Image: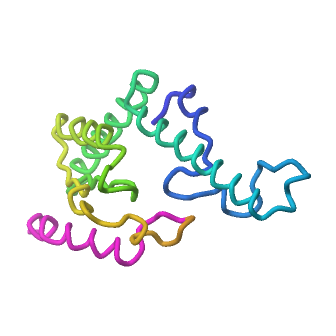
Amino acid sequence: QQEPSWAERQEFLNDLILNRQHMGEPDWKLPVILRWSALAELLASRRRGAEATEATLAWYRGMNGTENRAGFERTIDDIVAMEVAAQVAGAEFLVVLLPLLVDFDAYPFTDLHDATLAGIEARGVDAIDLLPTFAGQDASALWVHAVDMHPNAAGHALIAEALAEPLRQRLP
């Protein structure tokens, strides 16, 4: 969950899951005099992409920071509530922490990832961390498409392989 003031900071141009700035017509434009130049369009697109990525990295990194701390804690509370509901229903509950498919050689969200995992585990919720599964992988080779950074077949194969034995152990 997010505090309203924190949620307002997300531009949703490139949330590292979908790159919306390259889906259809962008909402930013070059001055009319430069629109004829493919080079100007390319440079402007790359600059805007870099700016959107940096803003997105800062936004994600701050999810458990002081400005959104209450939202982060509510998220952990919601996960605990899901586990309780599963227990009441007689079901098993397991959190699988899937990293964003970005630079695994210098993963930019290690602190947030670790804080999320620690918050879940500190409350007694069972979790599987998939970040080690992706270590050394080329993130872009695991994307559905350059503008859709969800896992493709190869990404899902890694996930399935990592989960197979832990899930097998949980079966009666």
Q: x%, y% of residue 108? A: 36, 45
Q: Residue at x 68, y 55 (%)?
A: 43
> Relative to residue 31, is residue 147 depicted above or below?
below
Color theme of the render: rainbow
Q: Position of residue 76 (x, y in %)?
A: 32, 36
Q: Quadrant of the C terminus?
A: bottom left
In which quadrant is the N terminus drawn? top left
State whether residue 146 is above or below residue 56.
Answer: below
Q: Nearer the viewer, residue 123 or 23?
A: 23
Q: In the drawing, does residue 167 fall left or right of residue 49?
A: left
Q: Residue at x 43, y 32 (%)?
A: 62
Magenta-tinted stretch: 148-172
Q: Note whether 129 is above or below 116 in the view shown.
A: below
Q: Residue 141 appears at what percent x and percent y?
A: 40, 72
The quarter holding residue 152 reads bottom left
Residue 39 percent across, percent down from the top left: 74, 61
What residue is drawn where x is 27% and y is 71%? 158
The quarter holding residue 82 reads: top left
Q: Is residue 65 left or right of residue 123?
A: right
